Image (spheres, helix red, strand yellow):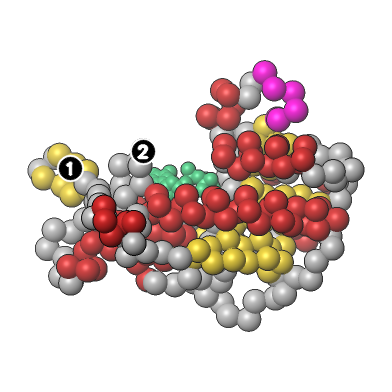
Amino acid sequence: MIVDNQYIYEGIRNLVEEINLNEKIDFFYSYHNVAFRKRYCNDDIFCPVSLKKCTEDFWKQYDVFFSFHCKQLFPDALVKNHRCINIHPGFNPYNRGWFPQVFSILNQQPIGVTIHEMDSEIDHGPIIYQEEVLIESYDTSYDVYQKILQKEMEMLRRNLYSLVKGEYNAVSVKAIGNINYKEDFNRLCKLKLDQVGTLGEHINLLRALTFEGYKNAYFEEGSKKIYTSIKFEIEENQMRN
Ligand code: 0FX
C-alpha cells in the first residue's frame, strides 16, 4: 500500500488491524514526501519508496498494489503486469487529475470517490466502486474535501476485504470525461479583477479556491500579491431546521 495522506494512513492502519485479512501488508510512502520522511524516519513498518527505481523482483513479492493519494505516477511496467488499485478523491471520468473538487465546484460535474483498477492513463481504468458526495452552494473546496475523505474511509471499511482478495467486478468507463492539471489550478488562483461574470460565478471561484491552511486565490497590486478567500455562515435557526 502506498499512502501519502496522513488521514488516510491513520485510517487504513486501524482498518487493517480491525479486519482480519490474513495477508501480509507492507506500507510505503513516496520518497519525495518530505513531511512523511520527517515524521516516519524512525518507523520501520512505513518506508519511503521510489516506484521508478523498483525492479520486477521487488514487484513480484506482492499480489496487489494500492495507491492511496500517492504522489507518484505508477510506471507502465507496474500497471500493465500487476493488479493496481487507485483510491481517487474524485468521480471518474469527470475532473480526473488535479484537485477534483475545485473543478467540480466550478463546472458542476459530479464529485465523490472512485476506486478503480489502474491503467497507463491518469485516474483511468475499470471502476470497482464509486460513490458521489453532494456539494452545497456554501461549501468551499475544504468542506467538499472533508466529505470526500470521510467517504473514502467509509468505502474502504466496507470494501477493503474484497479489494485485497480481488473479489469484485470492475466496469470499464465509456465516457472520456475531462482531466485537469496543476497548471489549470495555478491559473485559477491568479484572479483577474476585470473578469466579467455573474456574482454567483465569482462566489463559486472563491469557494473553489478556499481551503484552510492554503493561500490559493490572489490578485496583484504592483509587486504585491494579495491573497483572499471566502467565508460562509448559515443563520443559526436555519441550521436547526
Ligand atoms: O492527499 P492529497 O489529496 O493529494 C495527493 C497527491 O498530493 C496528489 O498528487 C494526488 N493527485 C492526490 C490524489 O493525492 O493532498 P494534498 O495536500 O496534495 O491536497 C489536498 C487538498 O488540499 C486539495 O484537494 C486541495 C487543497 N490544496 C492543496 C494544496 C497543495 C490547496 O487548496 N492548495 C494547495 O496548494
| Amino acid found under the numbered disc labelled 2 | Gly
The residue nearer to you, when weighing 121 against 117, is 117
Q: Residues within 10 Å of mark 1 (few under 14, many from 20)?
A: few
Q: Which residue is mark 1?
A: 226
Is there CB contact under 8 Å for labels 2 and 1?
no
182 left or right, relative to 158: left
Q: Which residue is mark 2?
A: 213
Determine which quarter of the picture holds residue 130. bottom right
Give the vertical position of 10 relative to 189 (above or below). Answer: above
N-terminal of the pair, mark 2 or mark 1, is 2
Secondary-structure class at tag 1: strand
Give the vertical position of 57 relative to 198 (above or below). Answer: above
124 left or right, relative to 180: right
> Main structural element of the magenta stretch: helix, strand or loop?
loop
User: Mark 1 CB in 8 Å range of ligand 1?
Assistant: no
Determine which quarter of the picture holds residue 54. top right
- Is 150 covered by the magenta stretch? no
Give the residue displayed 68% in from the left and 69% down from the top. 127
Which x, y percent locates residue 63? 86, 51
Q: CA distance from mark 2 to mark 1?
A: 16 Å
Determine which quarter of the picture holds residue 113. bottom right
Which x, y percent locates residue 224? 15, 39
Give the position of the C terminus as an image quadrant. Answer: bottom left
237 left or right, relative to 159: left
Q: Which residues are magenta?
A: 42-47
